[in-house]
């Protein structure tokens, strides 16, 4: 079981357990499935989710997933193999706050626009063999920097703001 957008590039949430009790509403006239703010559980971790799926002529999705206590390694394990290999270079000893916004066409092979905001306070962050202690920063990821191009790795950016940390006594 998995979630796929362009499955030639890999699967998301492979081998991830999913559970929720959500009361969605479907507007048959407008062809809109509305997911009100609800809790979902991915591998028994709680996330807040809300969004809409538009199934009309121009079908698309618009969804938010949030957590104030997400485990970075567990989230990276739900990404594709290629993304996971890159994210596995990083580690966090404490949970992070994350906001994920997915939007885009509901069309086979389409990659949705992904915007991720991540915040951590007083966390130990590792990168390869380096450890940074008492780290504070805000990070973001966007896979559609140039809105005239499709969402892709080549059209992505990562921004880290307000980074403070301690490293080897410095």
Image (cartoon, rainbow, N blue to C red):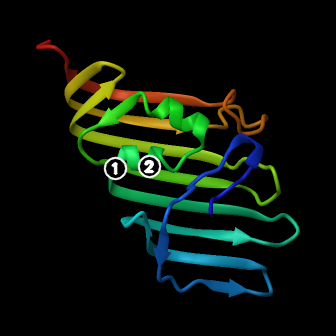
Please provide percent x and percent y for residue 157.
Answer: 57, 29
Q: Secondary structure at mark 1?
A: loop
Task: Look at 46% across and 44% down and name the residue there.
Answer: 76
Residue that numbered label 1 is attached to: 71
Label 2–label 1 contact, CB within 8 A: yes
- 61 and 146: which one is in front? 61
The picture quadrant where one finds residue 25 is bottom right
Q: CA distance from mark 2 to mark 1?
A: 6 Å
Task: Look at 28% across and 18% down and name the residue there.
Answer: 130
Task: Look at 44% across and 49% down and name the residue there.
Answer: 75
Residue 88 located left or right of residue 136: right
Residue that numbered label 2 is attached to: 75
Q: 72 above or below 170?
A: below
Please provide percent x and percent y for residue 154.
Answer: 69, 27
Q: 137 above or below 3?
A: above
Residue 135 located left or right of residue 35: left
- 136 and 146: which one is in front? 136
Q: 95 above or below 31?
A: above
Number of the label disc, if any, that sits on residue 89: none
- 82 and 66: which one is in front? 82
- 14 and 46: which one is in front? 14
């Amino acid at each position: 079981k998995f979630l796929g957008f362009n499955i030639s590039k890999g699967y998301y949430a492979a081998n991830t357990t999913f559970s929720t009790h959500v009361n969605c509403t479907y507007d048959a006239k407008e062809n809109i499935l509305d997911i009100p703010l609800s809790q979902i559980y991915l591998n028994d971790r709680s996330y807040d989710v809300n969004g809409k799926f538009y199934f009309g002529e121009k079908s698309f999705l618009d969804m938010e997933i949030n957590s104030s206590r997400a485990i970075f390694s567990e989230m990276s394990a739900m990404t594709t193999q290629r993304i996971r290999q890159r994210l596995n270079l990083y580690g966090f000893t404490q949970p992070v706050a994350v906001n994920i916004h997915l939007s885009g066409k509901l069309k086979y092979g389409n990659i949705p626009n992904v915007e991720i905001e991540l915040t951590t306070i007083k966390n130990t962050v590792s990168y390869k063999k380096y450890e940074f202690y008492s780290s504070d920063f805000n990070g973001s990821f966007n896979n559609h920097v140039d809105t005239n191009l499709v969402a892709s790795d080549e059209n992505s950016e990562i921004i880290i703001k307000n980074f403070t940390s301690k490293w080897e006594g410095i």
